[in-house]
């Protein structure tokens, strides 16, 4: 039975292996072992599939039987252990730097090791690239010229916002040119009637929140990193934030985008029309694409009206099922006015009190495991 199951698995994986080989990807691109393969075994009766083993163990006999079934090793839903630099990409030279200085100016082309080193490392310090150049464009035209040139020269690039991500998506893998949009931080317009904000991608979320709150509105998303994250990065990662339960994802709040494609083409989709059923809604392709399809340079965002008051409740529950029941009860009794719903388990609370100065448990005598 185990052999038949393994054979069936191999048949299902065969198209994937063929596709990888057709694209010229060797097994070492997708594995952590020298030979790039992994053997699998099945535990009869448990129906679990495990990797990196070569024997079958049954509950009855506990005997080991070697298998000859081999498939390319790939850890889905996990980081690739090692990525080789694509030799098709060019290496940065002095002529490239000179061109960027002509387009952007001396001050917007950064080669200082200390400043570039900061942009090479993610916020958690887990991922580090080896880029030697940081570009600071101040307009869509400059971004277009950068990408057009890099495309013609086959120079790899990585767009970067506030660099607050936790998965290394905003830092180079190798020596890519870093394009930071922090200099594009202008608020273009605000519709006081409809609450539509139009701004550049480098605007810090907290600054936008302060701006619209003075107008009687709030941003549809709120993050712990709002003091440094950029709205362009929020859109490129489809950030949800604390207010997701009420206002939904950015797919429903972003009305229009301006995007620069890899060849420098500027797509002007910066509409502020809420009800627009004309043609394909291309902006949704770029929301959450993390810069892989283009660089977001401007955005039009729908901001909801600011509520006159906000109430916060801190509750405790005994288990996760009770948490779900509490959420359902809140939705049924409070309806649309529920803006956020978050929980912490006992371990999170203990760690917060241990490592964060001044933090106290508002329910110290509570015996429950979850708090809201």
Image (cartoon, rainbow, N blue to C red):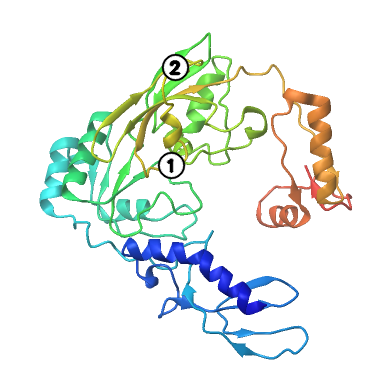
**Residue, disc 1:** 289
The image quarter containing residue 264 is top left
**Residue, disc 2:** 272
Query: Which residue is rendered at x = 56% and y = 20% of the image?
Result: 213
Q: Would residue 75 be visible to someone looking at this image?
A: no
Labels in figure, total: 2
Q: Image check: 108 left or right of 222?
A: left
Q: SS of the residue at dot 1?
A: loop
Q: SS of the residue at dot 2?
A: loop
* Mark 2 crowdedness (10 Å alpha carbons): few <14, some 14-19, many ≥20: many
- Foreground pick, 338 / 58: 58
Q: Image check: 264 left or right of 193?
A: left
Q: Quadrant of the N terminus?
A: bottom right
Marks 1 and 2, the one that precedes in the sequence? 2
Q: Position of residue 39 (x, y in %)?
A: 53, 79
Q: Position of residue 136 (x, y in %)?
A: 28, 39
Query: Which residue is rendered at x = 31% and y = 64% of the image?
Result: 24
Query: Which residue is rendered at x = 79% and y = 46% of the image?
Result: 371
């Amino acid at each position: 039975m185990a052999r038949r199951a393994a054979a069936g698995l191999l048949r299902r994986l065969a198209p994937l292996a063929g596709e990888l080989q057709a694209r010229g990807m060797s097994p070492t691109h997708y594995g952590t072992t020298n030979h790039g393969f992994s053997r699998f075994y099945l535990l009869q009766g448990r129906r679990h599939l495990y990797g990196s083993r070569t024997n079958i163990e049954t509950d009855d006999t506990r005997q080991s039987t070697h298998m000859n079934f081999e498939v390319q090793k790939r850890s889905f839903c996990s980081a690739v252990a090692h990525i080789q630099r694509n030799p098709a990409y060019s290496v940065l030279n002095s002529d490239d730097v000179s061109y960027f200085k002509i387009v952007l100016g001396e001050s917007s082309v950064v080669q200082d090791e200390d400043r570039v080193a900061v942009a090479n490392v993610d916020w958690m310090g887990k991922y580090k690239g080896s880029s030697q150049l940081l570009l600071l464009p101040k307009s869509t035209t400059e971004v277009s010229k950068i990408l057009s040139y890099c495309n013609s020269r086959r120079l790899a690039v990585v767009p970067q916002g506030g660099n607050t991500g936790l998965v290394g998506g905003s830092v180079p893998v190798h020596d890519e040119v870093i394009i930071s949009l922090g200099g594009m931080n202008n608020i273009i317009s605000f519709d006081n009637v409809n609450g539509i904000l139009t701004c550049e991608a480098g605007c810090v979320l907290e600054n936008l929140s302060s701006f619209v709150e003075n107008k009687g509105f709030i941003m549809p998303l709120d993050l712990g990193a709002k003091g440094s994250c950029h709205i362009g990065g929020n859109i490129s990662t489809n950030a949800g934030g604390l207010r997701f339960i009420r206002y939904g994802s950015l797919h429903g709040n972003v009305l229009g985008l301006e995007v620069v494609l890899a060849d420098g083409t500027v797509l002007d989709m910066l509409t502020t029309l809420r009800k627009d059923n004309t043609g394909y809604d291309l902006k949704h392709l770029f929301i959450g694409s993390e810069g892989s399809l283009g660089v977001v340079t401007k955005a039009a965002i729908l901001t909801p009206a600011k509520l006159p008051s906000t109430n916060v409740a801190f509750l405790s529950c005994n288990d996760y099922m009770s948490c779900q029941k509490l959420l359902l009860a809140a939705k049924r009794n409070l309806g649309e006015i529920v803006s956020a719903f978050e929980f912490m388990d006992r371990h999170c609370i203990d760690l917060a009190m241990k490592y964060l100065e001044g933090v106290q448990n508002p329910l110290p005598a509570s015996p429950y495991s979850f708090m809201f």
